[in-house]
Image: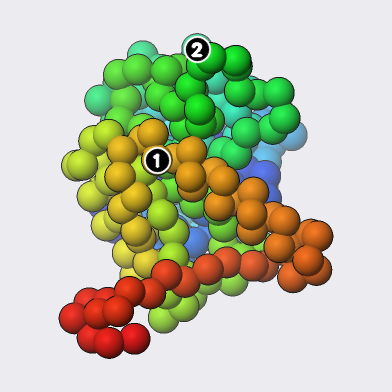
Amino acid sequence: MRGEPVGVVGCGSMGAAIAGLLHRNGHPLLLAGGPRRTGALLAATLPGSVAADLATVAARAPIVFLATRLRVTCQVIAPLTARELAGRVVVDVSNPDPGDMPEGGPRSSAELVADAFRKSAVVKALNCVSARRLSLVRPGDDLTVPIAGDHPAAKDAVTALLGGTGLTILDAGPLSASTWIESLAAFLRHLGTEQGLGDSVGFRLTTPHQKGRPT
């Protein structure tokens, strides 16, 4: 296992997929689940991982993935951990549910999360990959995952963390660009459900000379 632990808050299907991806890449994990002991149950399937409470994750993990619904993140998790997570990297993987976005307020769920964690470096990532698709990722897949954030060092840290997992990380710009990333997630859900492509749909972005080679 590598270095400092990575925190995952929320151990449902998405949190479990993120934890599995990081575990396959050799990262030690601190897992905070809900009242049904989901953290402990998940930790039992990932050797070397540790189930922990929110306070422990916030105190020990330099990077914390919030795999919780937006309202839970802002109304439950943030009041309990925002102070402890000051100066740390918080990765928001949420997509807004209908009615989540206030009129005249931020245009993306990531910006709402940043408002709730004002002293953290919030990075948008992994919201446009389904839990099932993420669980299938292996090195060499080159599945494109756009990220956004206002702190270059935080985006670099997330890119390095996810490097080698089979994901190609694309820097989409400042946190305001998360509006487009969340729209992409909605489009992929449409393809999966309305167009019958299933819950493993993803995308790969290519450029004319990606990494100096024609594609």
72 lies left or right of 79: right
> Is 206 placed left or right of 52 in the picture?
left
Compared with residue 13, is residue 117 higher up or lower down, i.e. above or below? above
**Is residue 62 shown above or below 114?**
below
- For mark 1, give the secondary structure: helix
Residue closer to the observer: 146 or 180: 180
Extreme bottom residue here?
214
Can you give x and y, in whole percent of width and height, for residue 113 in the image? Answer: 47, 25
Q: Give amino acid for label 1.
A: Ala
Residue 10 visible in the picture: no
The kind of secondary structure element at disc 2 is helix
* Image quarter in which the C terminus is found: bottom left
Disc number for residue 177: 1
Using the rendered view, name the quadrant where residue 178 is placed.
top left
Is residue 3 at all visible to an observer of this figure?
yes
Which image quarter holds the N terminus?
A: bottom left
Query: Can you identify the residue that label 2 sits on?
Result: 79
Q: Residue at x 74, y 34 (%)?
A: 36
Across and down, in percent, residue 87 comes to 25, 25
Q: Residue 19 carries which label?
A: none
Towards the viewer: 49 or 96: 96
Q: Where is residue 195 in the image (x, y as percent from the top left)?
A: 78, 66
* Residue type marked 2: Pro
Q: Earlier in the sequence, mark 1 or mark 2?
A: 2
Query: Which residue is at the front of the view, 92 or 27?
Result: 92
Tell me which corner region of the image, top left, top right, bottom left or bottom right, holds residue 11.
Answer: top right
Q: Which of marks 1 and 2 is in front?
A: 1
